[in-house]
Image (cartoon, helix red, strand yellow):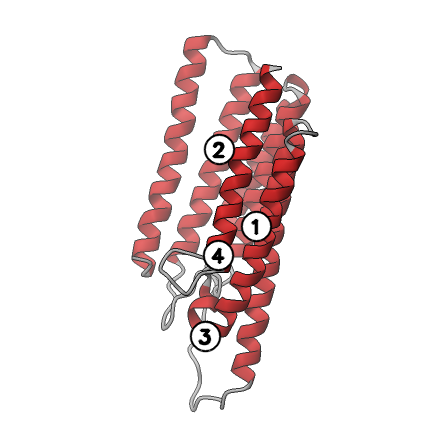
Amino acid sequence: MGVELLRVLYALFMGSFLIIAGVLTLTSKGEPGIGFRIGYTYLSERARRKANRVAGIMTIATGAVLIIAGFLLPMAYLWGILIAGLLSSVAIAYIVAKREYELEELSLEAPAGKEREIKPPNVRKHLAFQLLCLIGVLLLSPKLQRESTLFMCALILLFISLTIFTSRPLVFQLAPGFKGRMAEGFALSMSCASLMLLILATAEAFNVSTLGGLLIGFLALGVLFYGVFKALVSSYEEGYY
């Protein structure tokens, strides 16, 4: 009964949070830090409006589905709905923003002279590291609970997908320039998050003591906080301040 109550409360909390975030995104007028903001939406007001509309509706729908599922499905399925909903929202909003930006560009007269070529950031080393973390969790899977394995593998796959996605220049581009530092910082934070999961999987697989578990937990959080710190520093260097 306690586990079921916790699951329902989690679904209510996360679902309500997503619904509020979706409403803010849907009604955003371009306020700083609110809404679906990538390079295309900074370069085009038309792309910002259309992408925010799509992202807002899908985020609200994800929150509503999560609340309903909280009364019917196990926790692992709730995580699956959350991840699938957010990934779908980001992917479709990105496609819409890209399409609207390109349509707007086609309607404008081509600028004189050659435009500066934007070089994508190199995140291959981070992708390789995240893949190694995924392999590590899979190797430990015989000693892990099935739900833990599925959850950790799904999260690392999500981190890999986000790293690939954000390595595209126009995701983190700010007009008029792009240095790629924020994309690299974000990729580093995804690698740190993957390492954190591998550390936690190792602790679970070898059934460490309570004290050892606390130490490993602090180590995992330290790795995660380092990744977040580097991502924030890189966003400042890129110009998001």
- Dot 2 or dot 4: first in sequence order is 4
Identity of the amino acid at label 1? Thr
Identity of the amino acid at label 4? Thr
- Dot 3 or dot 2: first in sequence order is 3
- Dot 4 or dot 1: first in sequence order is 4
- Residue drawn at the location 38% of the way across and 23% of the way down: 218
Which-is-in-front pick, marks 1 and 3?
1
- Residue drawn at the location 40% of the way across and 29% of the way down: 221
Identity of the amino acid at label 3? Glu
- Residue drawn at the location 55% of the way across and 17% of the way down: 204
The residue carrying pointer 4 sits among few (fewer than 14), some (14 to 19) or many (20 or more) residues within 10 Å by Cα, namely: many
Please state the horizontal and vertical placement of residue 26, each as a whole percent of the image: 51, 59
Is the residue 167 above or below the residue 196 in the image?
A: below
Q: Is residue 139 visible?
A: no
Count numbered badges in the picture.
4
Q: Is residue 112 visible?
A: yes
Is the residue 156 above or below the residue 20 in the image?
A: above
The residue carrying mark 3 is 117
Which-is-in-front pick, marks 3 and 4?
4
Which-is-in-front pick, marks 1 and 2?
1
The residue carrying mark 4 is 25
Q: CA distance from mark 3 to mark 4?
A: 31 Å
- Residue drawn at the location 53% of the way across and 74% of the way down: 101
Name the disc covering residue 59, or none.
1
- Dot 1 or dot 3: first in sequence order is 1
- Dot 1 or dot 2: first in sequence order is 1
The residue carrying mark 2 is 195
The residue carrying pointer 2 sits among few (fewer than 14), some (14 to 19) or many (20 or more) residues within 10 Å by Cα, namely: many
Identity of the amino acid at label 2? Leu
Q: CA distance from mark 2 to mark 4?
A: 31 Å
